[in-house]
Image (spheres, helix red, strand yellow):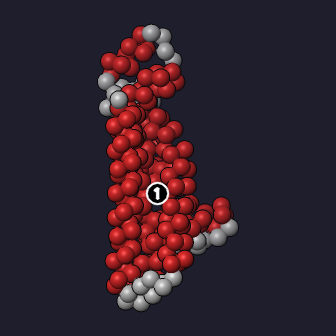
Amino acid sequence: MIFGVTAAKIYTSIFQTIYMVGLSLVFGLVIAFPLAVVLFSTRKGGIKENRLVYNIVSSVINIIRSVPFIILIVYIMPLTKAIVGTRVGSTAALVPLVAYIAPYLARLIENALLEVDKGIIEAAQAMGATTLQTILKFVLPESLGSIVLGITTGTVGLLGATAMAGAVGGGGVGDLALTYGYQRFNQPLMTSTVIILIIFVQIIQTVGSKAAKKAKK
């Protein structure tokens, strides 16, 4: 027993957190990248300017981002039930986590793409590159370092969201802190969960910063 909790329970909670962060990040990126490219391309002065498309996509992203995560979890429970067959557990938490992180990452990636010098885009177009080629072979490589930093920032935010997911049965370190720490007035366990989350953040930030530095080179 460690602070009144079995070691197996602590290890399970850590694994659940890694599981939720890892899968929701992957699914979130799959959604975020196309959204970011659409925002980058269709904005005013973009490669394929289309104000209607831009305003629709931008508005949807802003609406989702304006909803606090704890409310988002509860609000989309019917969708969660329809997709995974349950409203509680680590797998069920993936649905609101993806809904939370995808718009956030889309904005971060969009900002990274906007940092690319317009001269590079103009040079690509002058060489006859198509819109897709310009984005894939010029814009994305030039912005890769900033994209990695953005993803790192998003991952840290996602880690915090998984802790809140524990409040509705999502499992993970957050659930451990709430159920076995807060509700049982177990301060040592609460402190240990905070330390675990700090370690997670440090690892994510260190790996992300090194990857971004390597990408920029």
Figure disc tally? 1
The residue that appears at 43% across and 44% down in the rendered structure is: 106
Secondary structure under tag 1 reads helix
Q: Is residue 92 above or below residue 42?
A: below
Kindly indicate the quadrant of the structure image that contains residue 16: bottom right
Kindly indicate the quadrant of the structure image that contains residue 4: bottom left
Q: Measuring from the top left, give residue 122's x and y in whole percent.
A: 37, 16
Amino acid on which the number 1 mark rests in the picture: Tyr
Among all residues in the image, which is located at the extreme bottom?
A: 184
Q: Measuring from the top left, give residue 162's x and y in whole percent.
A: 46, 65
> Can the viewer see residue 176?
yes
The residue that appears at 39% across and 81% down in the rendered structure is: 189
Would you name the residue on which mark 1 appears? 100
- Residue in front for this viewpoint, 5 or 98: 5
Left or right of 98, for residue 70 = left
Left or right of 38, for residue 157 = left
Q: Measuring from the top left, give residue 149's x and y in whole percent.
A: 36, 43
Q: Is residue 47 above or below residue 129?
A: below
